[in-house]
């Protein structure tokens, strides 16, 4: 059976599942080049069909991830959907009204049913115009998160936790995944939870873009005094079994009138540190409570909150948690996959590859290089050539194979550098026009992981997808000054010969040249752009950043940049 999953909220995308197997998954932003693209993913739908070699009429089922998120009205008026968050912000009345509309719609049931039914009718008509004839069904937001985490995880049974700002009027859920592929929900937290706008509002308060720059708050947190403001944050957000504290009066959370006024004059580092600490306290208590209730110490996670790799580390370190897995595209970008798998009858099986996007042949790559009159060669041993350039302190972007799925670059749309330069975060981010506080992430071969990081066994599988922080060993501190954070943690990608043979070969070659089995890996894109998708995207970013070398497909490019 051919199943098409669609998500039309922010970071919209599509996924194709054939006979229970995930064949392709792409987010719209990679194609239209609009970061965190919102709206109906026309181009992503066409792309996953192309990757699967199917026509619209060959799709047997279509599943929409999100009953009323977005609401039918926003689905009718996509431009309003696209700009509402930017115009209103996390503190605006539009955000508050939308939150409480969803909450009341779900609690009253009839408005929820009507909105869901109207959305299904609208989307079915839209898909008919594209040539689809399959029935269209809706799939609840947090159910989609839950199925993505469990069915792509490495456990036959697990405690299943989802958490994000809000989707279909819920903020968090807890349940149990069973060997037959089902997920039984045990608890659902209303979108009125204080967890809903908690991290994104602090992101906006500190001058960053919510739903995009939360990682900068995580990075800033390591530089602040968390306990100074933690008592204030704890009054706002805390675990109150079986869920979280609630928002209460929405005006209490307004920027001018609410508790945020107590943050005036405080440093952004101290604010970020307290925000991060209290998030960790509340969410780990939630996970701990539900692991004890289910009796299942293997845990899977999905939802935008789990993009926070420091939080994931704290969950992994809980004594109740034996093993932890986080879905690679844990935010709303992964909903289409969860919805499609959720109706497919698939059994839980480890996601063996996150490389679910497009791949380009040598002819297309050469065409892109010739269009810009770039000089290139085809080395007999490209991994060794890359390793020698890296040993010589060169930056080497790498474009190869199928595109990664999710927010992380995992070797196929990646920029490499050696790990021992403590100043790399400053000068390389400047070249890429980024302002980041987290250090670059390291990538290591599986055989070196325990030499570099503490406690890897608790999350070795999920670390293939670079979504877990670890404390670093003394050895890692010595060799990886450019990718160890000030709090002695790092967010590694652990590579096996099977997970990415090309990347593994580069790591092995670099160790032969230098004796060090570690490299820096950051995403191949300029600031505020999605990760590159096509050879043309890669060439443009390469030239914009004024890099000297580019490894693309089997070719090595050398420019005149100094």
Image (tube, rainbow, N blue to C red):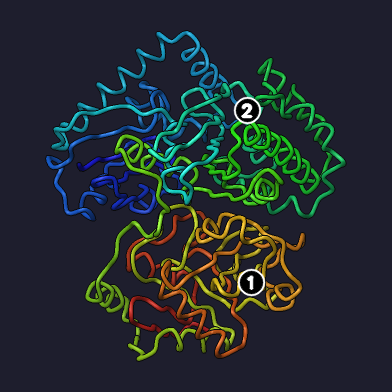
Q: Which residue is mark 1?
A: 427
Instruction: Give the left or right position of residue 379, taking residue 395 as reference.
Output: left
How far across and down, in percent of the image, does residue 391 sit?
Answer: 57, 87
**In percent of the image, x 66 and y 33: which residue is there?**
286
Residue 426: tell me if it is visible. no
Is 21 in front, or is 110? 21
Residue 417 or 352: which is nearer the viewer?
352
- Secondary structure of residue under mark 2: loop
> Could you tell me if residue 398 is visible in this image?
yes
Tell me where residue 541 appears, x and y as whole percent: 43, 67
**Vertical side of 486 occupied by 27: above or below:** above
Of residues 274 and 98, which is closer to you in this image?
274
Q: How many neighbours does mark 2 have within 10 angstroms: few (below 14), some (14-19), or many (20 or more)?
A: many
Dots 2, 1 in contact, CB < 8 A? no
Mark 1 surroundings: few (<14), some (14-19) or many (≥20) residues within 10 A = few
Q: Earlier in the sequence, mark 2 or mark 1?
A: 2
Q: Which residue is mark 2?
A: 91
Q: For residue 243, which quarter of the picture?
A: top right
Judge from the rendering whether residue 342 lies leftward or rightward of residue 320; answer left or right. left
């Amino acid at each position: 059976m051919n199943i098409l999953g669609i998500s039309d909220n922010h970071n919209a995308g599509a996924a194709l599942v054939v006979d229970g197997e995930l064949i392709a998954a792409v987010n719209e932003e990679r194609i239209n080049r609009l970061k965190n693209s919102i709206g109906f993913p026309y181009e992503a739908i066409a792309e996953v069909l192309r990757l699967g070699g199917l026509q619209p009429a060959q799709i047997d089922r279509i599943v929409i991830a999100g009953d009323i998120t977005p609401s039918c009205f926003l689905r009718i008026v996509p431009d309003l959907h696209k700009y509402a968050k930017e115009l209103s912000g996390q503190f605006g009345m539009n955000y508050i009204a939308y939150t409480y509309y969803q909450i009341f719609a779900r609690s009253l049931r009839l408005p929820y049913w009507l909105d869901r039914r109207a959305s299904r009718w609208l989307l079915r008509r839209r898909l008919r115009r594209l040539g689809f004839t399959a029935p269209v069904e809706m799939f609840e937001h947090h159910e989609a998160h839950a199925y993505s985490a469990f069915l792509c995880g490495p456990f036959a049974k697990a405690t299943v936790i989802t958490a994000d700002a809000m989707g279909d009027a819920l903020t968090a859920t807890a349940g149990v995944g069973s060997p037959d592929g089902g997920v039984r929900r045990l608890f659902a937290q209303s979108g009125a939870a204080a967890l809903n706008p908690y991290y994104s509002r602090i992101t906006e308060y500190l001058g960053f873009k919510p739903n995009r720059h939360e990682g900068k708050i995580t990075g800033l947190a390591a530089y602040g005094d968390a306990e100074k403001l933690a008592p204030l944050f704890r009054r706002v957000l805390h675990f109150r079994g079986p869920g979280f504290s609630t928002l209460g009066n929405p005006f209490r959370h307004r920027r001018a009138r609410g508790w945020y006024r107590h943050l005036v004059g405080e440093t952004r580092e101290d604010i970020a540190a307290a925000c991060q600490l209290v998030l960790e306290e509340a969410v780990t208590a939630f996970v701990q409570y539900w692991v004890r209730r289910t009796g299942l110490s293997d845990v899977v996670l999905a939802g935008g909150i789990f993009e926070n790799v420091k939080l994931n580390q704290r969950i992994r370190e809980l004594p109740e948690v034996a093993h932890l897995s986080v879905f690679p595209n844990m935010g709303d970008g992964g909903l289409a996959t969860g919805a499609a798998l959720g109706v497919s009858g698939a059994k839980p099986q480890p996601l063996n590859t996150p490389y679910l996007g497009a791949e380009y042949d040598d002819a297309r790559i050469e065409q892109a290089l010739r269009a810009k009159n770039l000089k290139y060669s085809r080395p007999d041993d490209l991994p060794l050539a890359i390793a020698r350039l890296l040993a010589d302190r060169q930056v080497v972007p790498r474009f190869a194979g199928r595109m990664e799925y999710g927010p992380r670059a995992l070797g196929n749309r990646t920029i490499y550098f050696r790990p021992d330069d403590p100043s790399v975060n400053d000068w390389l981010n400047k070249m890429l026009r980024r302002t980041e506080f987290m250090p670059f992430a390291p990538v290591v071969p599986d055989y070196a992981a325990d030499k570099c990081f503490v406690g890897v066994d608790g999350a070795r599988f999920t670390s293939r997808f670079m979504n877990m922080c670890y404390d670093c060993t003394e050895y890692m501190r010595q060799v990886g000054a450019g990718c160890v954070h000030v709090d002695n943690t790092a967010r590694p990608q652990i590579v096996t010969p099977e997970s990415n043979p090309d990347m593994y070969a580069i790591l092995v070659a670099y160790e032969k040249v230098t004796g060090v089995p570690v490299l820096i890996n950051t995403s191949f894109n300029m600031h505020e752009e999605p990760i590159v998708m096509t050879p043309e995207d890669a060439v443009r970013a390469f030239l914009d950043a004024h890099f000297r070398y580019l490894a693309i497909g089997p070719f090595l490019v050398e420019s005149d940049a100094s």
